[in-house]
Image (cartoon, rainbow, N blue to C red):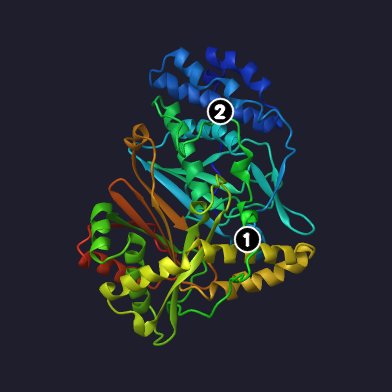
């Protein structure tokens, strides 16, 4: 579990700073929080002023960057808005058990170390633009829901392995966490809030605001939103409800898949590894094989999965999420993705050259709008069928279907966010991004990928101490002539 940072109190020198004294009345006009939170929020301004003064910022510039007007009415108004969970999110709180939650992480690596005081102010200004994230998960009689909460949202130093459970039981608790370590800013999300696309939008916007507060001219464009803008209802839409009635609504279950043979660890994940590859070489190699980067990486994963299991027959099934926004004109930052499974019998897993065309055909036929609409409509029907069933009766069914049984049909996962783009002014200040998935109840690994500039980062969340999968994957990448560096956390074996 992540440990909370001891909050630094405001010093007497900071308290007596003339600019801070000038800003305090304006801050208090914009903040109506419990006294302890309001005082810590004031202290955040004081710490930022101290940083700016130490680094030679002119007072007029500090006044502009830290204008209390930028708080808007967010911290002054009572929390009155609530959000029903989207169709994909409804199952996550039902299927969570002690020590197990659907958590994922998005990280950006800057070219300079993070300044915590400025990152805190960036979050304070950014969260008001994402009201659906300024929420706490609550249990209703029939469904869980997101209830708005007004509080000081905090940044914390990273002190634990990625994607550990978030404490959401306390009233007003966050459903995400913002972490920093060295030059890395990470946001970890409980999947009830969003999918990878929504999570990346928040991270880009937060990073853009952070860099802006450091004095860089960062345009507000694309996925780097204007944090002082007005939220649009389309951004919080449950876009699953757009689907029309389908004659053949396909479900979510399937045959049990071949699993890797290592013993599952109690810590989930027990290790996270990042395979940092040359993006241009990886793309060229994929083209030589006649496929996309996703198809090529899937082929490597099939081979590594086969090497890491003692099973000699059965089906290896790798789950591949599909962003539904490419089929609909949707701007939602909430969940709007489904998946298909790339599947091969163990005896069909041969060479990369032979597998890539087969995988490409599966991608072409299984990820169509028609297939996704069928699955999306099935999710709508499932939610409708359970709408009048109390939560305490839904929960054991969800744990069975989406816990052990649902995870059992997946050998591994590959979630590829593709190429991450930001404004050129921002790109010059960033080294790379990475994306990490938490784990399920059965599979021994989950893979995720994002490309930025010259670096393609394939992240492997491990759920076993057995190194067979990542060792074979590393060997396959290296033998293909793709420059590779491996980074990651220590192994928490138990």
Q: Is residue 157 above or below residue 64?
A: below
Q: Residue at x 59, y 71 (%)?
A: 250
Q: Residue at x 65, y 63 (%)?
A: 245
Q: Residue at x 38, y 21 (%)?
A: 55
x, y percent for residue 295: 35, 65
Q: Quadrant of residue 396?
A: bottom right
Q: Are marks 1 and 2 in contact (CB under 8 Å)?
A: no
x, y percent for residue 145: 71, 52
**Crowd around label 2: few <14 · some 14–19 · many ≥20 (10 Å):** some
Q: Provide the secondary structure element on which disc 2 rests.
A: loop
Q: Provide the secondary structure element on which disc 1 rests.
A: helix
Q: Is residue 155 above or below residue 216?
A: below
Q: Which residue is mark 2?
A: 228
Q: Is residue 494 visible?
A: no
Which circle, 1 or 2, is nearer the viewer?
2
Q: Is residue 115 above or below residue 390?
A: above
Q: Nearer the viewer, residue 473 or 195?
A: 195
Q: Which residue is mark 1?
A: 92
Q: Which mark is residue 357?
A: none
Q: Nearer the viewer, residue 343 or 429?
A: 343
């Amino acid at each position: 579990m992540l440990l909370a940072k001891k909050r630094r109190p405001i010093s007497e020198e900071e308290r007596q700073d003339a600019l801070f004294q000038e800003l305090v009345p304006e801050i208090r006009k914009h903040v109506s929080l419990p006294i302890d939170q309001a005082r810590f929020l004031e202290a955040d301004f004081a710490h930022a002023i101290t940083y700016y003064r130490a680094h030679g910022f002119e007072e007029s510039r500090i006044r502009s960057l830290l204008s209390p007007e930028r708080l808007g009415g967010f911290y002054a108004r009572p929390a009155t808005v609530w959000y029903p969970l989207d169709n994909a999110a409804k199952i996550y709180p039902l299927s969570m058990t002690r020590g197990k939650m659907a958590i994922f992480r998005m990280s950006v690596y800057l070219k300079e170390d993070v300044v915590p005081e400025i990152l805190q102010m960036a979050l304070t200004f950014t969260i008001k633009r994402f009201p659906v994230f300024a929420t706490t998960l609550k249990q209703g009689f029939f469904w869980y829901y997101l209830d708005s909460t007004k509080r000081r949202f905090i940044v914390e130093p990273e002190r634990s392995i990625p994607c550990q459970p978030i404490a959401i039981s306390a009233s007003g608790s966050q459903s995400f966490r913002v972490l920093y370590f060295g030059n890395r800013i990470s946001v970890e999300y409980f999947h009830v809030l969003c999918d990878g696309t929504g999570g990346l939008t928040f991270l880009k916007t937060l990073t853009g605001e952070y860099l802006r507060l450091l004095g860089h001219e960062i345009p507000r464009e694309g996925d780097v939103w204007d944090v002082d803008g007005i939220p649009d209802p389309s951004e919080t839409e449950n876009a699953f409800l757009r689907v029309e009635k389908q004659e053949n609504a396909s479900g979510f279950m399937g045959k049990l898949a071949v699993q890797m043979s290592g013993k599952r660890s109690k810590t989930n994940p027990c290790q996270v590894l990042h395979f940092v590859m040359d993006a241009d070489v990886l793309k060229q190699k994929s083209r030589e094989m006649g496929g996309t980067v996703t198809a090529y990486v899937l082929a490597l994963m099939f081979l590594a999965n086969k090497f890491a299991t003692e099973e000699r027959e059965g089906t290896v099934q790798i789950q591949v999420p599909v962003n539904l926004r490419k089929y609909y004109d949707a701007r939602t930052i909430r969940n709007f993705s489904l998946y298909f499974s790339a599947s091969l019998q163990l005896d069909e897993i041969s060479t990369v050259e032979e597998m890539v065309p087969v995988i490409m055909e599966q991608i072409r036929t299984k990820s169509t709008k028609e297939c996704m609409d069928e699955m999306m409509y099935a999710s709508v029907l499932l939610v409708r069928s359970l709408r009048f069933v109390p939560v305490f009766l839904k929960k054991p069914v969800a744990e069975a279907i989406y816990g052990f049984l649902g995870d059992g049909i997946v050998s591994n996962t590959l979630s590829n966010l593709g190429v991450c783009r930001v404004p050129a002014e921002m790109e010059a200040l960033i080294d790379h991004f990475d994306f990490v998935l938490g784990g399920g109840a059965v599979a021994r690994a989950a893979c995720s990928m994002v490309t930025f500039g010259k670096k393609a980062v394939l992240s492997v969340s491990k759920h076993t101490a057995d190194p067979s999968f990542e060792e074979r994957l590393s060997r396959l990448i290296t033998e293909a002539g793709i420059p590779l560096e491996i980074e990651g956390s220590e192994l928490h074996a138990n």
